[in-house]
Amino acid sequence: MNFKTKIVMILLSSLLITNCKEEMKNCVSQSTDTNVKLYNDLTDQLIPIFFGDNYLGEKKYFDSLRVAWLKNSDDKYVEERTKAHNNLFNNPEKFCNLYIDSTKNKNTDFATGSNNFITGNTNFAVDNPEAHINYIKRRKEFLKEFSSNTDIIKKLRTRSTIKANQFNLCTAKVLDLAEYDKHTNECEIGIVYFSEIVFDPSKKRALVFVDHRIKKYFHRNAIFKLRLHDNYWEIEDFTLLLTS
């Protein structure tokens, strides 16, 4: 497992089971539009846990985090990362740029792999039948609240049209991808796009496909399951579909 991949797994785990002394600050969207609020709350969590360390900007943070990594101390890593995050929080002079790609095309990359996601027809199943069975069980558990929604595949395949000016974040400046060439010398968190939102019947849980890349050397996508808790759409579960 490479450095960046392990970072994501550590931070996603720490989000779902929080045990560090200092908690990472959340930026709760005040938007009255349900969809806009959900995308903002989701991105607030994705920036520290899914988009890598680039958003922290200053190199000293990279150094302290890498030391924690080299010492194989996951707890120390989360502690250092949390301190760096909270130092950046609501400090726009230190923000890096996150670009929203909502116009490139109408489909998401989920369109090419959605059948495998639902049925469990994965490549490793041939050599590992038990893993195949577990994968199917996992998908059923992941989707159980959404069984009555017949548009799951359609929505996860369709790219959201949300724009940069609909985001109001506390750890990043959000720009439309069309502005990318104007800011080539500025620190970059990467380029992201979202699928449309799949809601369960209660409108208290949701699924969103997310694709994130940084130039040509860093690319991953996943489906995130969220729940509305205390007026905040928090990540409840996730399934990583691609990482490179």
Image (cartoon, grey):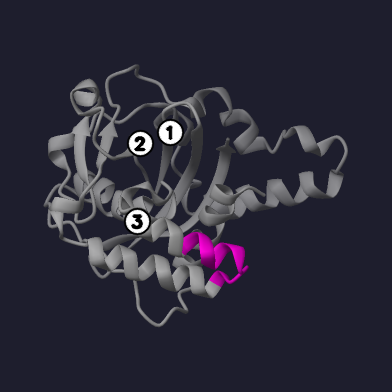
Dot 1 lies on which element?
Answer: strand
Q: Residues within 10 Å of mark 3 (few under 14, many from 20)?
A: many
Quadrant, the C terminus: top right
* Residue 110 lies within the magenta run: no
222 or 92, nearer to the observer:
92
Mark 2 or mark 1: which comes first in sequence? 2
107 or 141, nearer to the observer:
107
Q: Quadrant of residue 88?
A: bottom left
Residue 204's label in the rendered image is: none
Q: Residues within 10 Å of mark 1 (few under 14, many from 20)?
A: some
* 165 displayed left or right of 59: left
Instruction: Find out whether the residues at labels 2 and 3 contact each other: C-beta distance under 8 Å.
Output: no
State the count of labels: 3
131 or 181, nearer to the observer:
181
Residue 213's label in the rendered image is: 1
Mark 3 or mark 1: which comes first in sequence? 3
The residue at the far right in this view is 127
The residue at the far bottom in this view is 21
Name the kind of residue labelled 1 in the image. Answer: Arg
Q: Which residues are the magenta region? A: 65-74
Residue 190's label in the rendered image is: 2
Residue 54 location, x and y as percent? 37, 47
Name the kind of residue labelled 2 in the image. Answer: Gly
* 179 displayed left or right of 127: left
Q: Please identify, in this view, whether the residue under mark 2 or under mark 3 is nearer the observer.
A: 2
Q: Residue at x 56, y 69 (%)?
A: 74
Q: CA distance from mark 2 to mark 1?
A: 6 Å
Residue, disc 3:
45
Name the kind of residue labelled 3 in the image. Answer: Gln
Q: Please identify, in this view, whether the residue under mark 3 or under mark 1 is nearer the observer.
A: 1
